[in-house]
Amino acid sequence: MYETLWLDAAAFVGLVHLAAPIALRNSFRFSANSTPRLVTEDRLSPEAARCILAMKPQIQSLGFELLGCYEFAELNAHTSRTVAYFCNRTQNDFAHLVISSATNHADGYLEFSTSFSNGFTLETNNNSVPPLTPDNPQTRLFRFSEIRDPRELYSIHLELIDKYAHGICSEAEPKGQELKRMVRVLENYGPRHEQMGYMRLASDGAYRLTWKGAALMAWRGLWPTSLIRQISYRQAMRNELRSLEVRGVAALQKA
């Protein structure tokens, strides 16, 4: 009896792993061109307004100026994205409060980002979703999903800068052209994944998944692989936090 149940469960998992890449490949769409639309706070969707208006004073108290709220329609199929974009001109740091909305569901995260003169970028966010594709080798990305306080997250971001980019000059965007930075990052997403064989540029001007990309992304997002990856990633982030604590103690001892 139990052997039959195990066989049925294995067969079900196998079917899911066969069907998921097909479904993902047919539904995935990433726009090749990002055309953000500036929206005033009173025209935001209820989900975006609730999150942005609650977080805005906390982010501004860290020295950031709100550059504007922007909507990106359907970067992915059936998904819209609203971004509240902030800049700390003293530190040359940027903050993105990202709200992704799909049918009857909205999710968001806060990210701090700093680029440097050698082409390196360091990003720190509280996104709870591990990436399904390889990270950009020019970007060091840290996710601390349990840290919801903007001040604490930004403090960690600054400590990570000191650890991984100490002595390297941060790179500013010309005043009034800060939006180009965000657009540049988004429009590099498709070509970078095309080089890796995950995506291809379709005739409709959007990037679609290849079979390789669909299979690898789907399988990484399915149980049990997703659970293993999440546990491993969270442990790596905990180790990173511990290393910052050790560095802080060492710095105090030297002082």
Image (cartoon, rainbow, N blue to C red):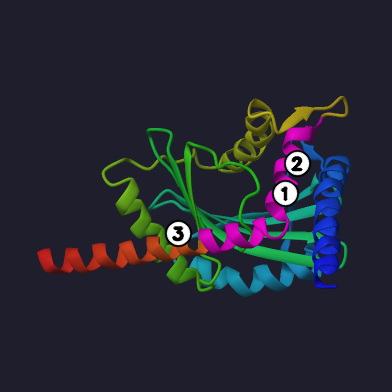
**Residue 10 picture quarter:** bottom right
Give the vertical position of 91 relative to 168 (above or below): below
Magenta part, dominant SS? helix
Q: Residue at x 11, y 64 (%)?
A: 254
Look at mark 2 in the image and give the residue it sits on: 215
Q: Residue at x 38, y 35 (%)?
A: 117
**x, y percent for residue 3:** 81, 67
Q: Is residue 227 magenta?
A: yes
Look at label 3 and name its amino acid.
Ala
**Residue 185 picture quarter:** top right
**CB within 8 Å, label 1 to label 2:** yes
Q: Earlier in the sequence, mark 3 or mark 1?
A: 1
**x, y percent for residue 226:** 66, 58
Look at mark 3 in the image and give the residue it sits on: 236
State the SS at label 3: helix
- Dot in front, 2 or 3: 2
**Residue 151 picture quarter:** bottom left
Look at label 1 and name its amino acid.
Trp
Look at mark 1 in the image and give the residue it sits on: 219
Image position of 96 (left or right of 92):
right
- Dot in front, 3 or 1: 1
Give the vertical position of 161 relative to 251 (above or below): above
Q: Give the alpha-carbon distance from disc 2 to disc 3, as whole Å.
A: 25 Å
The span picked out in magenta is 206-233
Mark 1 nearby-residue class (10 Å; few <14, some 14–19, many ≥20): some
Look at label 2 and name its amino acid.
Ala
Mark 3 nearby-residue class (10 Å; few <14, some 14–19, many ≥20): some
